[in-house]
Image (tube, rainbow, N blue to C red):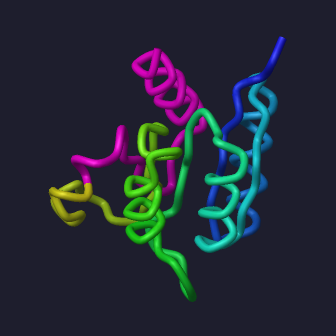
Amino acid sequence: MNKLKILVIEDEKDHLEDICFVLEQAGYKTIKSENGEKGLEMAKNQKPDIIICDLNMPPGLTGYQVLEEIRKDPGTALIPFIILTVFPRQDDVDIEFRLKVQDYIVKPFNFNDLLARVQRCLEEKK
């Protein structure tokens, strides 16, 4: 059986490792990236089933820019995208941006909530 692949783009190494550990324990295959440039390249080359991406990643491409590039490319445009952010309210994130993602998770978050949101996005993709 092929495991579903989840690309996690997160510049904070500890958060990246924790998220990937939880996803792997739940049976997913993870692809890790510590920056937007590498994450974008991995998305195009490996075509994950879902992308989880931090919104603010200095330096280089931000989550906003990664999403824009993902949505421009016909090969990746339909991949479900979940953003991670420290912004406490959805109002703090541009409405046009939010319309292009499947979900929005505020840090710190509960890993059970993350898994539920991933599962929902994957079910909606079917």
68 versus 73 height, above or below: below
Residue 91: which quarter of the image?
Answer: bottom left
The spot of residue 118 in percent (x, y) is 53, 30
Is residue 81 found inside the magenta-colored segment of the image?
A: no
76 versus 25 height, above or below: below
Q: Nearer the viewer, residue 9 or 15?
A: 9
15 versus 48 height, above or below: below
Q: Does 89 sit left or right of 11 as displayed?
A: left
Residue drawn at point x = 36 percent, y = 38 percent:
102
Q: Nearer the viewer, residue 104 or 109?
A: 104
Q: Nearer the viewer, residue 73 or 50?
A: 73
Q: Nearer the viewer, residue 74 or 71?
A: 74
The spot of residue 101 in percent (x, y) is 34, 46
Is residue 115 found inside the magenta-colored segment of the image?
A: yes
Residue 17: which quarter of the image?
Answer: bottom right
Segment tinted magenta in the rendering: 98-126
Residue drawn at point x = 71 percent, y = 69 percent:
34
